Image (cartoon, rainbow, N blue to C red):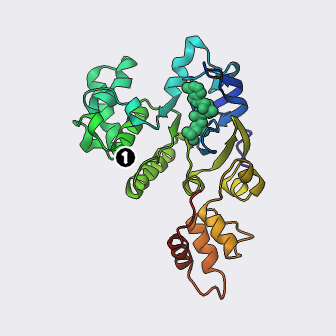
Amino acid sequence: MSGKKDETPLVDLRCGAHTYPDGTVGMHDAEFQVYPDEVVALVGANGAGKSTLMEHLNATLVPDDGELLVKGTPIDEDNKSLARKEVGFVFQDPDTQLVAPTVLDDVMFGLQNYGVPDEEAREKAKEALSTVDAGHLKDRIPHYLSGGEKRLVGLAGVLVLDPSVIVLDEPLAGLDPERSRLIIERIRDVHEDGVSVVLSTHDLDFAAEIADRVCVMEDGNVVGRGTPREVFYNDGLLRRANLHPPTAVRVARDAGVGKEMKPVTEDELVEVLEGEPGLGMTGTEVLQADSADGGEDG
Ligand SMILES: Nc1ncnc2c1ncn2[C@@H]1O[C@H](COP(=O)(O)OP(=O)(O)OP(=O)(O)O)[C@@H](O)[C@H]1O
């Protein structure tokens, strides 16, 4: 398990239950913490409760019973703005977030809501856009941007508020490999700048590559958590949650290697395979052969 437990969490959610207005229980008996300086991946099958949990982290949703603490402060009706300020949410559907006539106006919007004067807001918004390599988009109409561009602008709109935590719902959904790579790099930059990141994903290769901790959800509950190595080599847990292990785990097993190191990423797998005498293929060749076979996705 990750050694974060002694630190005070930035966000501490205890949710007895969350019931939607139509009576569907979206989440129950769940606890979830976000610690300083970490990337947490939330994984689980469709309908497992990932979005429901994430929307509790900035008090967009509130538990029927339970509580949310942000930096140790309990959040209630009167101080939800603290949760919104500290925990920035980047929606899966970027159109939900982009409302202003231009990209720059959009990124300025949150700051103006907090009473930041226009000129200062404009400068900060430009800075946030360049942080995510989207400065060139500032005069565009948000609605007409590509999916990847919208995702970057959504990220800038959240970063400009200087949050402690950003929450990204399926940040790679619908993106081509190049755009995905760009978003992954930006997430890494944000993390290096000291912001903790929570993201949900169906792509376990991505989770293995980016996360310090992985939390597994099933049927509205967090049923397992640990480092990527702990979670992705836990067959019983993955089966229970209807998940398939990441590519590196499957290939290592098929090749009968890596029992000590337990590779979870492509780079770790290559390292293991290249150290393996008499394999007959380099690590890269094995990976190519796996993808030519149409290696099943997580
Ligand atoms: N607005 C809503 N009204 C009623 N039920 C909802 C609502 N939103 C989600 N649910 C239900 O809550 C449960 C958890 O849904 P949630 O969207 O949190 O899952 P998820 O893990 O994010 O799924 P996916 O991977 O498909 O996005 C599901 O049974 C879903 O049908």
Residue at the location (68% across, 41% down)?
217
Taking the image as shown, residue 139 lies to the left or right of residue 45, namely left
The quadrant of the rendering that contains the C terminus is bottom right
**Which residue corresponds to mark 1?**
148
Please state the horizontal and vertical placement of residue 78, each as a whole percent of the image: 56, 11
Taking the image as shown, residue 68 lies to the left or right of residue 167, namely right
Q: Nearer the viewer, residue 198 or 289?
A: 289
Q: Nearer the viewer, residue 285 or 270?
A: 285
Q: Quadrant of ligand 1?
A: top right
Q: Quadrant of residue 117?
A: top left
Taking the image as shown, residue 81 lies to the left or right of residue 48, namely left
Please state the horizontal and vertical placement of residue 46, each as a whole percent of the image: 60, 42
Residue at the location (43% across, 33% down)?
158
Q: Residue furthest top?
A: 78
Does the rendering let one see residue 185?
yes
Amino acid at pointer 1: Gly
Please state the horizontal and vertical placement of residue 143, each as a whole percent of the image: 29, 34
Please state the horizontal and vertical placement of residue 84, each as a whole percent of the image: 51, 24
Q: Residue furthest left?
A: 139
* Crowdedness near tag 1: few (<14), some (14–19) or many (≥20) residues, C-alpha within 10 Å: many
Query: Secondary structure beneath disc 1?
Result: helix
